[in-house]
Amino acid sequence: MATTKKNSISDKYANVAATYFAMSSANTARFVKFDFPFSVLDKVGLLINRMEYIMGGLDKFNGTLDWAIAGLCCAASVADTEDTRDPLIVDQYKLQRLDIGTAASGLVLEAPFMKDFSGLPGGGILVPPNPLYAFMDSDGASDVMTVRIRVYYQYVELAVEDYWQLVESRRVVTG
């Protein structure tokens, strides 16, 4: 898969798409669509080289085992944002509170949390650019939380057969 056409529009440098949003209510998943300028008819893939996550509102966790998850997916109909087997989920980052020892113990988290996919075969994760959503979900939070997500990507024009195989692998087309 992922053979490119001659005279393709493949990018030489990484582009950046970013979003910032708050959950609509505590412990309820929210999905925000990225608006890339390509449709299904354009046969263009998005090669994701790197992801960055910064979660806000971690003080909203009430107790041990409370969690928040953010990520990237190919549909806003993901039922379980924690399901790593779901082909609609491209990437996810989860933070979970664990109380260990006395109540005064704590953990320092580094932000942004970065994932580098450039070492993968092909230079990253290949996904259809439309539809593509950022999401955030939580369990146990006392109030809404926020997330900043940055996606570093390149456009890759694909042969027709390769593009449809990519789309079907992410279940964007339903039947």
Image (tube, rainbow, N blue to C red):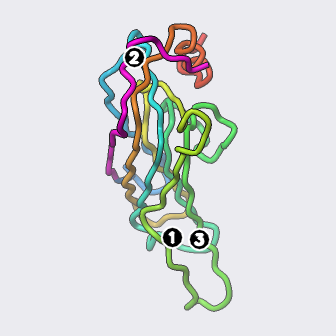
Q: In terms of image quadrants, where is residue 83?
A: top right
Secondary element type, mark 2: loop
Q: Quadrant of the C terminus?
A: top right
Reply yes or no: does residue 4 show up in magenta: yes
Q: In terms of image quadrants, where is residue 147?
A: bottom left
Chain-order first, disc 1 or disc 2: 2
Chain-order first, disc 1 or disc 3: 1
- Pick whichever, 134 or 80, lies toward us: 134
The type of residue carrying mark 3 is Arg
- Pick whichever, 101 or 9, lies toward us: 9
**Residue at 58% over, 88% down:** 105
Chain-order first, disc 2 or disc 3: 2
Residue 53 x/y as whole percent: 44, 56
Q: Nearer the viewer, mark 1 or mark 2?
A: 2
Residue 67 x/y as whole percent: 57, 62
* CA distance for labels 2 and 3: 46 Å
Secondary element type, mark 3: loop
Q: In terms of image quadrants, where is residue 97?
A: bottom right
Q: Quadrant of the N terminus?
A: top right
**Residue at 64% over, 68% down:** 65
Dot 3 corresponds to which residue?
A: 97
The stretch of residues the image draws in magenta is 1-21
Residue 140 x/y as whole percent: 55, 63
Dot 1 corresponds to which residue?
A: 61
Residue 87 x/y as whole percent: 63, 31
Contact (CB < 8 A) between labels 1 and 3? yes
The type of residue carrying mark 1 is Phe
